[in-house]
Amino acid sequence: MASGGKGRADSKAQQEFVSEAEDILERMRDDLSAVAEATQSGDETDPDVVNRLFRSAHSLKGLSGMFGFQAMSDLAHHLEDLLDGLRMGRVQLSAAGIALFDESMGVIAAVLADPGSETVTASAEREIHAIIERIEAWNRDPTADPDAGQGGSQLPDSLLRALTEYEEHRLRESQRRGKGIYVVDVDFEIASFEEGLGEISAAIKEVGEIISTLPSPGDTPDSHIRFSLLTATQLSRADLATRLDLPEASIAVGDPPREPSEGPGSSTAESEPGEIEAPATEHATHEQTTLKSISDTVRVDIKKLDELMNLVGELSIQKGAIRRLAHKLGIDPATARAGAELEKMHRSLERKLQELQAGVLEVRMVPLRQVFDKLSRVVRRLRLDLQKEVELEIHGADTELDKLIVEELVDPLMHIVRNAFDHAIEPAGERERAGKAASGRIRIEALQRGNDVVIAVSDDGRGIDARAVLERARQRGLVPADAELTTKEALDLVFLPGLSTREAVTETSGRGVGMDVVRSNIAALGGMVDIESRTGEGTTITIILPITLAIIQALIVGVGDHRFAIPLNSVRETLLVDLSEVQRSEGRELLNLRGEPLSLRHLSEEFRLSSRNRDGKQYVVVLGMGDARMGLIVDRLEGQQDTVIKPIQGPIREVRGIAGATELGEQGAVLVLDVAALVDDLGRRGDA
Amino acid sequence: MSVAQHQSGATWDLLARVAAGSGEGEEPVILRELLAFSLAGDRYAVPVERVREIVRMRQLTPVPRVPAEILGVISLRGEIVQVMDLRMRLGVEVSDSSRTSRIMVLHGDEGAVTGLLVDTVSEVLRVPEEAFRPAAAGEAEFVTDLCEHDGHFVSILSVERVLNVGS
Amino acid sequence: MSRILIVEDSGTMRSLLVQSLEALDPGLKIDEAQNGFEALRLLPRQPYDLIVTDINMPDINGLELVSFVKGNAQYASIPLIIVSTEGSDRDRDKGLELGADAYLVKPFDPAELHRVAADLLASRGD
């Protein structure tokens, strides 16, 4: 047997490794965002977060080493060292340092995205070495560990012996800051200790820090377990006891708190050279995540959820067939009873199916936080690159959306935020002359409204001059010279492709780079974009999206000027046949399909559309519903597309043969064929 | 864009006249808000609360197997909405849509909406209830009331009747 | 039949540990805990013959777990292996001081894990 990790790693293990490493990376990015925000606003960084970052780097190092990703492991090792310095207080984090981390995350993500690729690995290695050199350069010049305090002499030895090096450091640090050091003893039943421990831990974290949690046998060791929580807080023992609703006797004092000698604001961290002092911002509230055990969750490939969703879709089609059968039975008095029974069953099936669909959809929902965190990273980066002071405010990061939509949102949102940062927000001097705060502000807000999620990105920049936009659009012939537009309509012109070029409106209005792309991206998700702006005051871009995409694959076909979508799960095959192959029987057209007769219908005749029949050749889409087959003759096959079927609203409730409609980007609405109905109708005609 | 912004000076004149005529100390005047639009040169209106939004004409996808007055469907921020030609529905002379043509998106039953193609959307009228005159019974299929405004009659449509195509 | 408890927050590392130990003896019963809390819950339920634990874990670290196991008359006799990414020497020394029977450095050599685990299980069997 090979010793060492790499040889043992089969591809399944490698997949597991990649997905776990991605999880770690995502967590590091989240934590880094929190640290960056705290650094930026001058708050004390949460030691738990820094420690979690350290642990993540540590895990990543071990994992990637085990799987033979040596460069990644080296980089993680260096990050670990750096984070160790940070959590031990040897190093202060600057904006440049955070950018270094961001870059590292980026390189690691690139390797993970294509772990088999040698070229990716090679170029990533070069980047990694460059980053490592910078980290080493930084590490050579660390801020010295600020005078570590004395070990807590009054603490029980059993507790001190189980402290890791890091926890020892946290203890010294708390003592140095004059905090009170206590040991809070709590006793729980083994069967349910996590809930109680979670509550008390949360209560302590509101007023201080838990340095260590040491378990020991409880009063009755068989059924109870005791925890000694090494706690650092400014509170006195009495206050802490009140706060935690515990008798004072269960709290032992290691060191009482010193009188706070320095105000909370005076302990400023030393700034690294080149660090940008950004003003305090109202941050997204990172709510305390629950202490719920991770073991209750599983990772699921989104493709599997799509498959489930497709199954639900297919079941709905079967359900339709049952309903039709129930109707048929209901007409004949001899079978009316059975028909009514079947109808009842159909209704209950429908309800269950809706619940199933809702359940699958719910699993796909993820909070927008992950996108918003990416945006904060971009803004941090831009702050450094462009030397511009802009605050980013985020609200509603917990709003949930379909995972696929969230992924597709990254690019458009990035684009909007970059535009706002780069073009809309004026340089500090210009802002001050206009009587605005020197530092600009971008606000992102998400909220759910009915079945939609609304995301608004506002800036307080120079705004868009609607007249200038209209003027430019006229010059380019995008609107008639005599067109009279409202301000709103003129603003909407920024979404036109011809206008969305840098030179077009940037200087005059500060917006418009690639907004057409943003709009088409959002439209492809079934959403819409809206823009509002006031000259001199700023701009708000609002994106409205459906909460979920019930996606089906569809074949798009054309007849004359018309387009239709056919759910791919009912398409068996497509054929290009010569008209001479078509035979007739009792006026019905047939095709010999490998020895079996296939009934043909022209979609143009079915829907009374004018068709541009080509001479000789015809496209036949072979539709299958259960065992029934039919061939649908169309003019063109236009390809496959992921689509979302929407109901058609309006006075006409049902159109035979149409299941709904879907939006195909710029082409507007496209009707989706109800294959079950079409096949059914053919059969009925056959019966008659 | 809110329809209320379209409120014109004429409305205020009307209000002023109403206020002057009613005198002080009498019972308060109940005003009804109507969205007025034109169709083949005539003035029509629907209760403003039935209007969700007004949009320009856009890419229309025809739908087979529906009555002719249903022109097709449009995509409205991902919602698929039928559009009805109001001229055809009311039996007035049909013409192509023009630059001022708008689709009034009306609230129908059960949260569904329907688009109504009209020539020009003009303004929101605030009309006292007393100014309503019932339309002559038997003569009008869709008009419930008439009200006088600026020397012209405005026909007030029953949204229910207009949208009741299926039967 | 021997029963082993693995405490490790990394799923991948956990399955590697399981794989390695199963190769030692396919009949082994192996329980997995994702964190210290789970380990605390599992411990009273089964008589374990060996515990393999990581150090760096959220909530309760490996040292705290070692302290609990070795400081508790019920469990003190269960052999315990720490498997951790090369950490500080101090953490290793502390682990051994607290009573851990062996300390392996990740990436560990499966053969080494076999040898140590087999030794410890055998000593228990005596």
Image: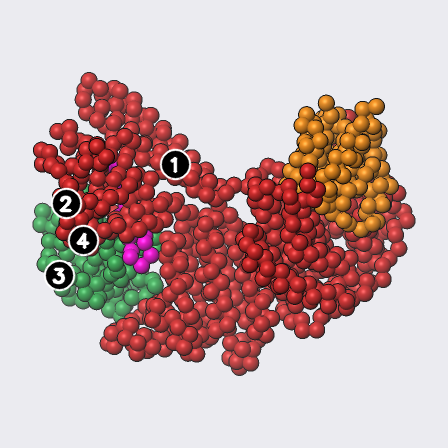
Chain colours: A red, B green, C orange
Q: Quick one: which residue is furthest to the front in this view?
A: A1
Question: Which residue matches tag 3?
Answer: B95
Say which chain tag 1 marks.
A
Q: Is residue A372 above or below residue A6?
A: below
Mark in front: 3 vs 2: 2
Amino acid at dot 1: Val
Callouts 4 and 2 close, C-beta under 8 Å? no
Instruction: Quickly name the residue at label 2.
Output: A579
Mark nearer the N terminus (4 vs 1): 1
Quadrant containing the C terminus of chain B in the rendered view: top left
Cα separation, mark 2 vs mark 1, equals: 38 Å
Magenta extent: A663-677
Residue at the spot of label 1: A312
Up-down relation of residue A89 to residue A585 (above or below): below
Mark positioned earlier in the residue sequence (2 or 1): 1
Q: Amino acid at mark 2?
A: Leu
Residue at 22 percent across and 24 percent down: it is: A330
Q: Whole-percent x and y of residue A36?
A: 64, 61
In three-dimensional space, the C-alpha distance between marks 3 and 4, rounded to whole angstroms, equals 24 Å
Nearer mark to the viewer, of 4 and 2: 2
On whether disc 2 and disc 1 are found on a single subunit, the reply is yes
Q: Are marks 3 and 4 on the same chain?
A: no
